[in-house]
Image: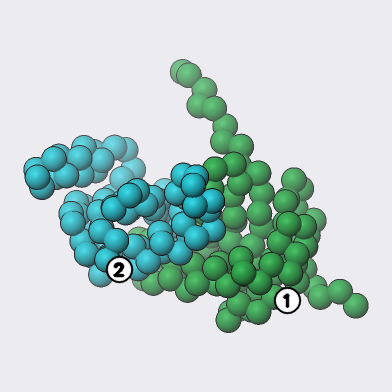
């Protein structure tokens, strides 16, 4: 089962500019990571996705959260049971 | 006298704005977000959580801007001088130009 997730993570990390990718479950448990993704942020990423979803229409799509600093971007998207975070350098 | 909006009320095509203190109290608001304390509290929680996520490996490279993209609107959030600035705008992604 993990093999599919590993393959997807491997595929994501090969996109241009991506420095790390992280998958966490709804409890903040890290399910997979590749590259230089900060594992200590797993809980915060899951919590952030949950908090942002409260801004959205409950029947609509979940929001995309984009955190920007001077040299990097984090894109976070929650799906049914999974939250994915992509770390990019800019 | 109206509370200072620090120019955020002059953003073109804005649907609404909020200026909040660090703990989520509304300093100034307008448009669809006028006196919207529920959204103000949700956004304050988002900001506090977002600051715990390191964007890059460099700890000096701190968070500058948070965007929460919903279906057709986007909340642009930034922090300056211990205040949280929020602007709600239409989200119109540009179509990619084929090479």
Neighbor class of circle 1 (other Cα within 10 Å; few <14, some 14-19, many 20+) is some
In this view, the residue farthest toward the right is B1
Disc 1 marks which residue? Answer: B27
How far apart are the alpha carbons under marks 2 and 1? 30 Å
Q: Residue A55 at x, y = what percent?
A: 54, 58
Which labelled disc corresponds to residue A41? none
User: Which image quadrant is residue A22 in?
Assistant: bottom left
Residue in view at x 54 percent, y 51 percent? A57
Q: Residues within 10 Å of mark 2 (few under 14, many from 20)?
A: some
Camera-nearest residue between B94 and B45: B45
Q: What residue lies at 50% left-to-right and 72% top-to-bottom?
A: B45
Give the answer, above or below, for where B20 lies relative to A64: below
Instruction: Say which chain is cyan.
Output: A
Q: Nearer the viewer, residue B91 or A54?
A: A54
- Residue A50 locus on image (x, y percent): 41, 61
Can you give x and y, in whole percent of width and height, for residue A10 in the image?
18, 42
Residue at the top extreme, as displayed: B99
Q: Residue at x 20, y 44 (%)?
A: A9
Q: Residue at x 45, y 49 (%)?
A: A62
The reply to whether residue A68 is in sight is no
Element under disc 1: strand
Q: Nearer the viewer, residue B60 or B19?
A: B19
Circle 2 — which element? helix
Question: Looking at the picture, how far across and down is residue A77, in whole percent?
Answer: 38, 50
**Is residue B40 rendered to the left or right of residue A8?**
right
Q: Quadrant of the N terminus of chain B?
A: bottom right
Q: Colour of chain B?
A: green
* Chain letter for the residue marked with disc 2 in the picture: A
Q: Is residue A54 visible?
A: yes
User: Which residue is denoted by mark 2 in the rendering?
Assistant: A43
């Amino acid at each position: 089962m993990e093999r599919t997730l590993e393959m997807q993570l491997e595929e994501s990390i090969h996109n241009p500019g991506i420095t790390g990718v992280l998958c966490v479950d709804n409890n903040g448990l890290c399910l997979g990571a590749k590259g230089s993704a900060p594992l200590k942020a797993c809980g915060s990423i899951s919590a952030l996705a949950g908090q942002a979803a409260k801004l959205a229409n409950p029947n609509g799509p979940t929001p995309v959260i984009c955190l920007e600093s001077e040299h990097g971007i984090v894109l976070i998207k929650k799906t049914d049971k999974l939250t994915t975070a992509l770390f990019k350098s800019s | 006298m109206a509370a200072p909006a620090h120019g955020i009320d002059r953003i073109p095509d804005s649907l609404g704005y909020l200026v909040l203190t660090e703990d989520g109290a509304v300093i100034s608001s307008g448009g669809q977000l006028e006196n919207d304390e529920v959204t103000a509290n949700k956004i304050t929680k988002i900001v506090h959580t977002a600051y715990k996520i390191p964007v890059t490996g460099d700890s000096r490279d701190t968070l500058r801007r948070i965007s929460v993209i919903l279906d057709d609107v986007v909340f642009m959030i930034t922090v300056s001088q211990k205040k949280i600035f929020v602007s709600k705008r239409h989200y119109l992604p540009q179509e990619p130009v084929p090479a």
